[in-house]
Image (tube, helix red, strand yellow):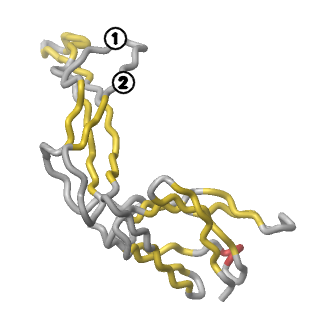
Amino acid sequence: NPDNSDSSEITPPVEEETGQLIAAPKSFELDAGESRVVRLVLRKFSDDMEDIYRVRFLPDKPALEKIEELGGTSVQVNVVVSMGALIMAAPKEARPDLKFVRNDDTITFTNAGNVTAQLQREEFCTEDRKVCTPLEGQRIFPGARWIMTIPDALKDKEFSQTMLVNGSYSTLSYPAP
């Protein structure tokens, strides 16, 4: 639900299997402590909107950990470990456009662009360092809206936050109300 302002991370609008992203190698084994480079190839870039993929690396089958007898009942414990990655593939022509409106105690963000904007979770301090407070981070997908509650220490002050869009960092300045 891209419009859910109660979530700590807004999830992409749709999750479904796709044949657009290819992983190589298709299967592999890892022993404890090992790592492996996996190449991901996108078959086609979108012309107008960022594509979002969640890649999951799943084991072939659970490894049998332990079988025990408890009061005449056999108990089997399997451990399944998986890894995942969120892939954001920018369109051929990226158009970042994160808009915000500051009210007394909130800032409403609307992503009118075609790529994800990520507000960084960080601590903001005034120049004199008399006020330092953590700022919430959030990934705002294209077409999504998010409302950030302004920390009490900054409600009447100008402050800024770092944003990551399409691999580039910039600073958003929030003027005092």
Going by the numbered disc 2, the residue's amino acid type is Val
The residue shown at (22%, 29%) is: 58
Residue 62 spot, x, y in % from top left = 19, 20
- Numbered disc 1: secondary structure: loop
Going by the numbered disc 1, the residue's amino acid type is Asp
- Which residue is tagged 2? 37
- Which residue is tagged 1? 31
Q: Quadrant of residue 166?
A: bottom left
On screen, residue 45 above or below 116: above
Residue 90 spot, x, y in % from top left = 34, 56
- Binning the other alpha carbons within 10 Å of mark 1 as few (below 14), some (14 to 19) or many (20 upward) gives few
Residue 74 spot, x, y in % from top left = 14, 14
Q: Quadrant of residue 127?
A: bottom right
The residue shown at (63%, 57%) is: 122
Tell me how far mark 1 sits from mark 2, CA to CA: 14 Å
Q: Split into 4 quadrants, where in the image is the N terminus?
A: bottom left
- Numbered disc 2: secondary structure: loop
The residue shown at (18%, 17%) is: 76
- Answer whether labels 1 and 2 touch (C-beta < 8 Å): no
